[in-house]
Amino acid sequence: MLQIVPRYLDQRFPERKLHIARLQCADNDFRDLCRDYEDCAQVLDDLSRNPISDLKRIKEYQELKLSLELEVLEYLER
């Protein structure tokens, strides 16, 4: 059963959509990583839309998102 690629991962890696979907079905750790990435990206999106958001917190989430992106790329390069 092929899962739909989560929104933020699809936006970030549209050319890898099928590979991501296959890995999500086959690898629980990758599925968890995708969930973490989606959660982080959603929080960052919400923070960025709020004009009174703490810039330090936004920076922390940007760094976390980048770190998670690198982990996703490591999986995709295997």
Image: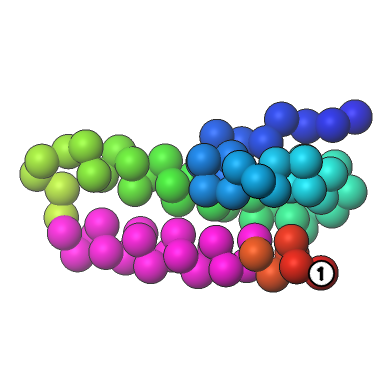
Q: Amino acid at mark 1?
A: Arg
Residue 56 location (% of width, % of height): 19, 64
Q: Main secondary structure of the magenta part?
A: helix
Secondary structure under tag 1 reads loop
Please state, as top left, top right, bottom left or bottom right, where the N terminus lies in the image: top right
Whether residue 35 appears in this view of the structure is no
Display colour scheme: rainbow
Q: Is residue 68 above or below residue 45?
A: below
Q: Is residue 5 above or below residue 31?
A: above
Whether residue 29 appears in this view of the structure is yes
12 in the magenta segment: no
Residue 24 location (% of width, % of height): 78, 45
Please state, as top left, top right, bottom left or bottom right, where the C terminus lies in the image: bottom right
For label 1, the crowd category at 10 Å Cα-Cα, with few meaning under 14, some 14 to 19 and many 20 or more, is few
**Residue located 78% across and 48% down the image:** 19
**Residue located 74% across and 61% down the image:** 76
User: The magenta stretch spans which residues?
Assistant: 55-72
Residue beneath disc 1:
78
